[in-house]
């Protein structure tokens, strides 16, 4: 009897933190866990930036160049860091301002767009990377968010001026679609943003641009294929990667926007459920998949970076790898599931999946592989989505931008009452 | 034409020879070895300094960056990044399944392009580094050349002024130069020449003064003697060919 009582006591003590976390939605322990993820992930952007240029590394490995998309996310993350009291106003303002000045004075641009990868210190184009429309768009999104966050300051004017320089019409290369990029060596790339995916954010900024807009009809030019998996109907992306349902949602509050019967917010919720269902259905083939092992999305795997995804998709890539940011960035869509699963993998795998900058890039139980790296855009969308889940602060600020209002007006979207 | 001692300048056509082809041609360019060697040494030293600096900046700039750029550590980073870039492109453009020979070696292409870009950036940075360092050296050399050329330009100007003064009849104008100036020999000779002129003219003037003053008291023979003395001094100056 004594043994049983002692066992019950020990088990109670051991399981106390987890039980506390899920004692109820919004409980203190749960808040602490969310706060921990957000704060640790924030540190990626604070510590992996060049102190002089403010440019942020593509990933945490040594010698990584700057990714302008990671930098765009970083601009918003730094503001979030200030709003949460992790850094002072001056620290946040100076870092964001310095970064924007680097883009204005140092980085080479073509028609207002920037190269995907640049040197952290000099801002020079590296790896002969392309002038990227989506990565520039994510940078502009970060700049426009910062403009609203620091409204009425010199920073606001600088951020807006960078966005206003972008000649979106040029980026269509005479078509009704945005091209993925351009290089000085070969001109426009052969690929266009012609499917539903993260490219939404580029179309929003392009249609809403007051200086070089593209016609609102372009919104209708890309494919919106509808598929179904596990009873969830989804306007799906080519690879079915979860990030394609998250990146634009990190900035734009789609909750009350109706696009000819499509509600992209609900669509993302359905996509997350379909993704999870796909993982549960394939749990026998891959040990890491299951009720708390889902969120298949593009990220690092044992064979390198892959566009992992789940059904519905046009092309499926999966090998048992889980990229935790897929779950973390789903927090506004499915908070209960997201938090439960994140806590589960955190408890189960500990430092193998979680480190100084939050959740690591990926893991694959089948191959006993755990990434030790962190990827800037993964960490960026994680912080923004967690903040949106907690306060909606990113949406609130970003939606105040005139270009977003113009995009909605020009596309004739109806806004449903919340 | 005059020719100073030690200055072996021979003008072609001096005696009605051909002067049409641009004047004099020097046979001996080593007319003042001491001065020329000094100036040659100064110029060569300046050039050596500039070249040395250029060489050092280029050598260490290029070598330092190249060694770091192609260190095993850096190459392994680049190899990983090349692989990552390929994966990113595959994911974004859906090119993973494209089985072309070029696609198999895309990392090699990335590395090659990155290497070429690195070389370009290294040279560009070295050039910029050189420009920032060479500019102060050019300024120092320019300041030094003004100081050195002043040693020539100063005496020439001083001699010109004295000659002008002498041309207007003032034989008291001297040719004294500053310490360290060039043309000390020339100024000494000019000083000697002026002294001789002054002496000859003074003697002539004295004889003529005595002649004028004592004309009534002197015998014709004495008058003739005084006049001849004055003439003899003046005949020192050759005025006819």
Image (cartoon, coloured by chain):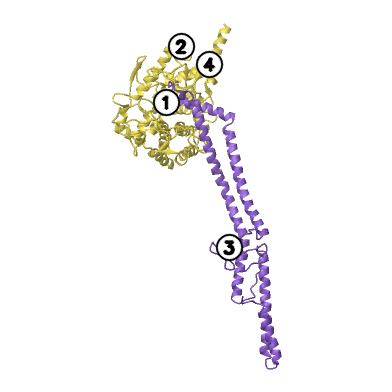
Chain colours: A yellow, B purple
Q: Are marks 3 and 2 in contact (CB under 8 Å)?
A: no
The residue wearing badge 2 is A285
B1 to the left or right of A15: right
Residue B53 against residue A143 in the figure, above or below: below
Q: Position of residue A311 (x, y in %)?
A: 39, 17
The residue wearing badge 3 is B24
Q: Few, some or many C-alpha atoms within 10 Å of disc 1 (few <14, some 14-19, many ≥20)?
A: some
Label 3 vs label 2: CA separation? 101 Å
Q: Position of residue B212 (x, y in %)?
A: 66, 89
Label 3 vs label 1: CA separation? 78 Å
Residue at image x 43%, y 34%?
A185
Label 2 vs label 4: CA separation? 15 Å
Instruction: Please tell me whether mark 1 or mark 4 is closer to you in this view.
Output: 1
Label 1 and label 4 in one chain? no
Q: Are marks 1 and 2 in contact (CB under 8 Å)?
A: no
The residue wearing badge 4 is A368
Instruction: Please tell me whether mark 4 or mark 3 is closer to you in this view.
Output: 3
Q: Position of residue A261 (x, y in %)?
A: 29, 23
**Which chain is disc 4 placed on?**
A
Q: Are marks 3 and 1 in contact (CB under 8 Å)?
A: no
A405 to the left or right of A386: left
Residue B117 against residue A284 in the figure, above or below: below
């Amino acid at each position: 009897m004594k043994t049983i009582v002692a066992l019950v006591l020990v088990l109670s003590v051991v399981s106390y933190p987890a039980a506390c976390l899920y004692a109820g939605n919004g409980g203190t322990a749960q808040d602490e866990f969310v706060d921990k993820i957000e704060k640790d992930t924030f540190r990626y952007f604070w510590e992996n930036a060049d102190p002089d240029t403010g440019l942020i590394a593509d990933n945490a490995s040594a010698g990584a160049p700057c990714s302008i998309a990671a930098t765009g996310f970083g601009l918003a993350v730094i503001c979030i860091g200030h709003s949460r009291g992790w850094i002072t106003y001056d620290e946040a303002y100076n870092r964001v301002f310095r970064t924007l000045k680097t883009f204005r004075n140092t980085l080479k641009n073509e028609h207002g767009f920037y190269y995907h990868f640049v040197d952290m210190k000099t801002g020079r184009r590296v790896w002969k990377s392309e002038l990227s429309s989506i990565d520039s768009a994510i940078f502009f999104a970060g700049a426009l968010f910062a403009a609203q966050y620091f409204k009425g300051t010199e920073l606001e004017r600088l951020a807006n001026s960078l966005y206003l320089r972008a000649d979106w019409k040029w980026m269509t290369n005479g078509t009704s679609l945005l091209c993925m990029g351009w290089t000085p060596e070969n001109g426009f790339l052969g690929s266009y943003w012609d499917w539903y995916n993260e490219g939404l954010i580029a179309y929003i900024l392009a249609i809403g641009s007051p200086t070089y807009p593209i016609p609102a009809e372009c919104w209708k030019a890309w494919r919106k294929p509808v598929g179904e998996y596990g009873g969830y109907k989804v306007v799906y992306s080519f690879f079915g990667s979860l990030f394609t349902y998250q990146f634009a949602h990190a900035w734009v509050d789609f909750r009350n926007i109706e696009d000819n019967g499509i509600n992209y917010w609900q669509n993302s919720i359905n996509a997350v459920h379909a993704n999870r269902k796909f993982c549960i259905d394939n749990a026998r083939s891959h040990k890491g998949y299951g009720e708390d092992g889902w969120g298949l999305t593009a990220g690092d795997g044992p064979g390198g970076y892959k566009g992992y995804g789940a059904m519905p998709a046009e092309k499926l890539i999966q090998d048992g790898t889980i990229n935790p940011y897929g779950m973390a960035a789903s927090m506004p869509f499915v908070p209960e599931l997201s938090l439960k699963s994140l806590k589960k993998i955190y408890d189960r795998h500990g430092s193998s999946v979680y480190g100084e900058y939050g959740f690591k890039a990926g893991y694959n139980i089948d191959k006993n592989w755990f990434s030790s790296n962190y990827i800037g855009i993964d960490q960026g969308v994680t912080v923004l989505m967690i903040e949106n889940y907690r306060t909606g602060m990113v949406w609130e600020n970003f939606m105040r931008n005139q270009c977003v209002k113009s995009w909605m007006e020009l596309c004739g979207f109806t806004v449903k009452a919340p | 034409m005059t020719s100073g001692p030690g200055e072996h300048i021979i003008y072609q056509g001096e005696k009605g020879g051909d002067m049409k082809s641009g004047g004099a041609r020097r046979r001996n360019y080593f007319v003042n070895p001491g001065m020329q060697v000094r100036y040659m040494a100064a110029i060569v030293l300046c050039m050596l300094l500039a070249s040395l600096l250029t060489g050092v900046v280029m050598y260490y700039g290029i070598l330092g960056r190249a060694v770091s750029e192609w260190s095993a550590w850096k190459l392994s980073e680049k190899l990983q990044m090349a692989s990552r870039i390929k994966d990113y492109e595959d994911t974004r453009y859906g090119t993973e399944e494209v089985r072309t020979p070029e696609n198999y070696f895309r990392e090699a292409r990335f590395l090659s392009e990155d290497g070429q870009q690195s070389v370009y950036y290294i040279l560009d940075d070295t050039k910029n580094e050189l420009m920032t360092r060479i500019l102060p050296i050019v300024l120092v050399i320019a300041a030094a050349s003004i100081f050195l050329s002043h040693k020539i330009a100063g005496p020439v100007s001083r001699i010109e002024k004295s000659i002008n003064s002498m041309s207007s009849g003032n034989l008291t104008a001297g040719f004294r130069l500053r310490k360290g100036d060039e043309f000390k020999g020339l100024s000494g000779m000019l000083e000697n020449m002026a002294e001789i002129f002054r002496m000859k003219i003074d003697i002539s003037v004295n004889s003529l003064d005595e002649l004028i003053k004592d004309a009534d008291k002197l015998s014709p023979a004495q008058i003739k003697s005084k006049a001849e003395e004055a003439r003899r001094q003046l005949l020192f100056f050759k005025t006819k060919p």
